[in-house]
């Protein structure tokens, strides 16, 4: 049964329906629908699987709760990595995650950090990025048209979030 969503809705970058009520954090609609159906909050590890395959759908008849392992089995049934791919993954894992490899990485970072030139370089890069971003923001805000557009946009979203009519400017236009 599709329940009406309270508040405003939109699609996120992954194609799921999100909604927000008032000032709450946005929530994925399919997780909310499953919580309503079960009558309890979902655990963070529980995955809501779309039986219909339609990501924006929040019809609780099209949803089921699965563990991560069961969800992987659902999507990867019949998939088998080739021997070459398995060998590549094993080699990559061995090189990166063995205790010896992890120790070597941390030793290398410690040695680098002990050198003053490296520390100065890292700090300079961080300051440079921050200064560049600050300069861009300041130059944008110096433009009166940009500043007026940003202020109007923020006012409109503030009014909308409180269910108020859109603000009007001095000439009576919205």
Image: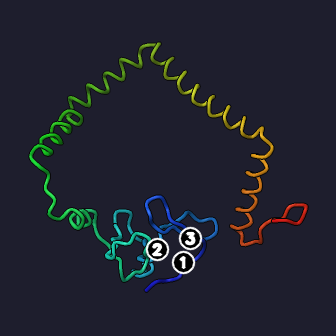
What label does residue 5 carry, if any? 1
Q: Which residue is mark 3?
A: 9
- Residue found 41% across the figure and 16% down from its top: 114
Query: Image height check: is 82 above or below 66?
Result: above
Question: Where does the image place residue 169, in percent across and percent down from the top left?
Answer: 86, 61
Label 2 residue SS:
helix
Q: Nearer the viewer, residue 55 or 32?
A: 55
Discs 3, 1 touching: Cβ within 8 Å: yes
When asked about the image quadrant of residue 22, the answer is bottom right
Query: What SS does tag 3 mark?
Result: strand
Residue 72 at x, y percent in the picture: 24, 62
Query: Residue 168 vs residue 46: left or right?
Result: right
Quadrant of the snapshot with the N terminus: bottom left
User: Outermost residue, right direction?
Assistant: 171
Query: Tag 1, which secondary structure?
Result: loop
Relative to 75, is 110 on the left or the right?
right
Residue at mark 3 to residue at mark 1: CA–CA distance: 8 Å
**Residue that appears at 68% across and 67% down:** 161
Instruction: Specify the label residue 81 is tagged with.
Output: none
* In the rendered image, the vertical position of residue 100 relative to residue 44, given as above or below: above
The C terminus sits in image quarter: bottom right
Residue at the spot of label 2: 32
């Amino acid at each position: 049964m599709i329940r009406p969503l309270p508040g405003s809705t939109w699609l996120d970058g992954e194609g799921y329906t999100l909604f927000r009520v008032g000032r709450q954090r946005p929530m994925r609609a399919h997780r909310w629908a499953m919580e309503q159906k079960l009558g309890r909050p979902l655990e963070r590890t529980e995955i809501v699987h779309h039986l219909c395959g339609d990501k924006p759908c929040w019809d609780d008849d099209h949803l089921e709760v699965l563990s991560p392992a069961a969800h992987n089995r659902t999507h990867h049934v019949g998939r088998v990595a080739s021997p070459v791919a398995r060998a590549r993954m094993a080699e990559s894992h061995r090189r990166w995650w063995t205790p010896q490899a992890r120790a070597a990485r941390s030793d290398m970072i410690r040695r680098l950090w002990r050198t003053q030139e490296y520390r100065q370089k890292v700090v300079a890069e961080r300051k440079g990025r921050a200064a560049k971003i600050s300069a861009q923001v300041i130059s944008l805000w110096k433009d009166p048209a940009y500043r007026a557009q940003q202020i109007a946009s923020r006012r409109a979203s503030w009014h909308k979030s409180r269910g108020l009519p859109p603000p009007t400017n001095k000439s009576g236009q919205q």
